[in-house]
Image (cartoon, rainbow, N blue to C red):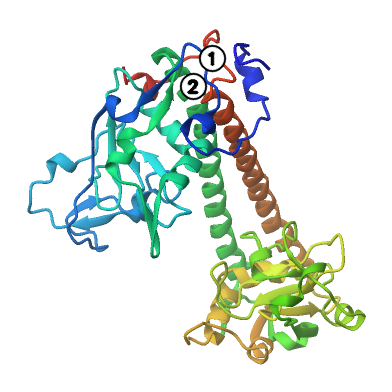
Amino acid sequence: MSEDQQLTLNEVAESNAGPKAAHIENSAFGNIPDDWTWEKTGEHLKYIQSGISESQNKDGEGIPVSRIETIANGIVNYQKVGYVNGDKDYSKHRLEPGDLLFSNINSRAEIGKTAIYRGEQPLYHGMNLLRLRYDSNTFNPYFAYYIYDSPMAQDVFFRMSKAAVGQSSINQSQMERLFLPTPPFPEQRKIATVLYTVDQAIEKTKKIISKTKRVRRGLAQDIFREGLHTDETKETWLGKIPASWSVVQFSEIVDSNRNGLYKSKDAYGHGSPIAKMGNALENRVLDMSSADRLELTEKEKEKYGLEQGDLIFARRAQEVSAAGDCCYVPELDELTVFTSSLIRVRLKEDMSPKFYVQYFDGPVGSRSIDRITTETSISGIATSDLLDLKVAVPDIKEQNEIASILWGFDEQIWSLQREIGQYKRLKKGLMQDLLSGKVRTTDTNITVPDEVAQYG
């Protein structure tokens, strides 16, 4: 497509273009349209400055201030703000809607993270972030935000950052000298609107996921306390459970168990996939779409191979898991083994593994796991302690019913998470096309929302 061709908004949404590599600003965004210009950032800023440098606390005392963690995911997360003593006049540091917070001191991989403050809650500008306030009559702050958030600009920030021990930085003067592709002001607002609309769809879907998880969590509390077919309960070592459920040692319903395989790093590279706890989804299902591989003997394949319906438990706490986290093994495309950081448990045929994945994630089973977790420098569980655990056992019909109900919620959450992934891929392609002028919005009928239209 030539750069002066124009598409409808529907055609824009169907674009699959992806980001290209960049070295400097111009090559990052490519050749911009003739009616666009390259504008130096400093010429459109009301100001750019660092924030309050006072010591912060997390106790909620004083005034809320931004931290690096506040914008770690590209949004303002009010759950991760700090606080400083409010007995000084910090009014000049109070954020206004449209202000951009830019991570200019961070690890090199995180440098350049940007969020736009929308004014949902009062917030002041803290340290290790630059605040940029644009002249909204010449440069729409939402457009600026999407420029900064784009893969093209993120690559530029990575290249212009100055590396130091443990962190990198971009200084204020570097930012002021940064050149940005600048379309006419009405087109800035239209471009921002398209990307803002995708962001709104992502946020709406996240809220639905959050609500679904809350409903599921409340239902699980009720089910594991009262069951499905009676509200009579009994007190046990496990706490309150349905009166009709029995309590046995976990080993009594386990057919076999095994700790995983250990191989040195030089064995990895080719061969069969090996499951780690990092392959366990938040939704308690093993995902081998991305995995390390290693060469195996036939004996190792037989000894450590996973089968559909196996349960795997994390032996120790890791960045992606807590000790005792339980995961279900679905049908696998090829023979897969598991690492020594995991315990494989294969239940007896008259037990439902899908029920017990939900059980160990629920209020009764997770409390039991907590009791056998050793608190050392790295929290962990022993296989013998796991097998000695007391577990609740409903009849198999109720196990299957409970698994079906809770799994239904999980499948809804997985579907919504895939939807978010699709939105993010769409946004990435739109950024590449719209912010470089490859796709134009000039002749499209786009209603600019108030959030964007209030500037300029």
Q: Residue at x 65, y 15 (%)?
A: 2
Residue 394: in sight, yes or no? no
On the image, numbered disc 2 is attached to which residue? 191
Q: Above or below — where is 111 with respect to 44?
A: below
Instruction: Tell me the quarter of the picture where residue 47 sits.
Output: top left
x then y, percent, for residue 127: 25, 53
Q: Is residue 149 left or right of residue 393?
A: left
Total marks placed: 2
Asked if disc 1 and disc 2 are in contact, CB closer than 8 Å, the reply is: yes
- Label 1 crowd (10 A; few <14 / some 14-19 / many >=20): many
- Earlier in the chain: of badge 1 and badge 2, it is 2
Label 2 Cα crowd, 10 Å radius (few <14 / some 14-19 / many 20+)? many
Q: Indicate the quadrant where residue 431 lies.
A: top right
Q: Which residue is mark 1?
A: 441
Q: Nearer the viewer, residue 402 or 91?
A: 91
Identify the residue at image location x=29%, y=17%: 137
Q: Is residue 129 visible?
A: yes
